[in-house]
Image (spheres, rainbow, N blue to C red):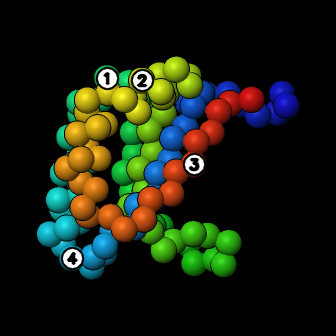
Amino acid sequence: MSSIEKNNENFVHVVLFWLKNPNDEADKEAFKKHVQTLLETSKHAKNKHLGVPAQTARFVVESSYTFCLKVTFDNLADHDKYQVEAAHKLFISEAAYLWEKVLIIDSEVF
């Protein structure tokens, strides 16, 4: 696959969150605060992105989620360290009350 350009995103971790109260501004702000703390304190997460559904109304586009978090890692080992690090565990323990559903997509460069 030489036509695919490799970048520094060797391992991509995408997490879609559906909040319990997606229209509640206080809940959305609380969630953003928790994610910001996670991203500022994680020792392993590299490129970081927190977003909301884009206005791309096509039937093949998933847009029912409230937030999309993308973090990248150099490799699977760094991803695995992220999963057990204190910052990630704290995020889950403090913010889990806000969401009703989570979907994770992990991808590695081939």
Report the side of 47 relative to 33 (left or right).
right
Q: Which mark is residue 105?
A: 3
Mark 4, Cα crowd under 10 Å, few <14 / some 14-19 / many 20+, is few
Tell me which numbered mark, 4 or 1, is placed earlier along the sequence: 4
Q: Which residue is mark 1?
A: 43
**Outermost residue toward the left?**
26
Q: Residue at x 52, y 51 (%)?
A: 104
Residue 102: quarter of image: bottom left
Label 2 crowd bin: few (<14), some (14–19), many (20+), radius 10 Å: some
- Pointer 3 and pointer 2: residues touching (CB < 8 Å)? no
Q: Position of residue 5 (x, y in %)?
A: 71, 30
Tell me: residue 41, above or below residue 37.
Answer: above
Residue 59 in sight here: yes
Which secondary structure lies at badge 2? helix
Whole-number angstrom distance, CA of label 4 to CA of label 2: 33 Å
Mark 2 or 1: the one toward you: 2
Above or below — where is 6 with respect to 95?
A: above
The picture places residue 63, in percent across and down from the top left corner, at: 51, 71
Q: CA distance from mark 2 to mark 1?
A: 9 Å
Kind of residue sitting beneath label 4: Asp
Element on which disc 1 rests: loop
How far apart are the two marked residues, 3 and 4, measured between alpha carbons? 26 Å
- Indicate the amino acid at tag 2: Lys
Which residue shows up at 45% across the image and 45% down it? 70
Give the Cα separation between the discs numbered 4 and 1.
Answer: 31 Å
The mark nearer the N terminus, 3 or 4, is: 4
Q: Quick check: marks 2 and 1 in contact, CB under 8 Å?
A: yes
Q: Which residue is mark 2?
A: 81
